[in-house]
Image: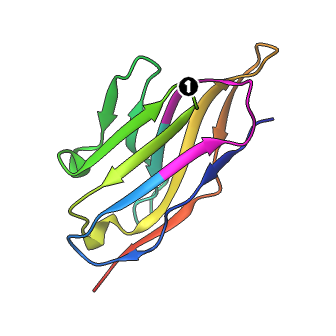
Amino acid sequence: QVQLLESGGVLVQPGGSLRLPCAPSRSGYVIITMGWYRPPPGKQRELVAVIGAGGSTNYVDSVKARFTISRDNAKNTVVLQMNSLKPEDTAVYYCYARSRSPMGVMADVWGQGTQVTVSS
């Protein structure tokens, strides 16, 4: 079973920028969709941004024009570029991937989460 490796979570000041990369722990898996989720206070995880294999993207309204998701298909990696960060962006961010194993088994895979804190 492949795992997702995340990094980049830190404390950043309002208006600052942050880059969250995510990559699978093993090669040989086809990554179909990749994205980032976060749980709003008192709620389950919400989609922040997602990117399909063909490059199509989708964002939650609150981050449009501030966040950009991109992927490197050759490396099966995804990066969430976060600009103009606000205190309400504070959350644990979880990387997600819809994957297909070398044996053709489909699976939803989640990372362990990385803490992003926006505060002065």
Q: Residue at x 49, y 66 (%)?
A: 9
Regarding residue 45, the answer to whether it shows in the image is no
Q: Residue at x 76, y 21 (%)?
A: 101
Q: Which residue is mark 1?
A: 74
Direction bottom: furthest residue: 120
Q: x and y percent of residue 57 in the render?
A: 33, 29
User: Is residue 118 toward the left or the right of residue 106 in the image?
Assistant: left
Residue 110 versus residue 91 in the image, above or below: above
Query: What residue span does the magenta drawing correspond to?
Result: 21-34
Pointer 1: residues within 10 angstroms few (<14), some, or many (20+)? Answer: few
Q: Residue at x 26, y 65 (%)?
A: 85
Viewer-proximal residue among 2 and 72: 72
Viewer-proximal residue among 102 and 87: 102
Quadrant of the frame with the C terminus = bottom left
Residue 15 versus residue 28 in the image, above or below: below
The amino acid at mark 1 is Ala
Q: x and y percent of residue 17 in the render?
A: 29, 64
Quadrant of the frame with the N terminus = top right
User: Is residue 2 toward the left or the right of residue 59 in the image?
Assistant: right
Viewer-proximal residue among 116 and 108: 116
Direction front: furthest residue: 74
Regarding residue 25, the answer to whether it shows in the image is yes
Direction left: furthest residue: 65
User: Is residue 75 toward the left or the right of residue 35 in the image?
Assistant: right
Question: Chief secondary structure of the magenta span?
Answer: strand
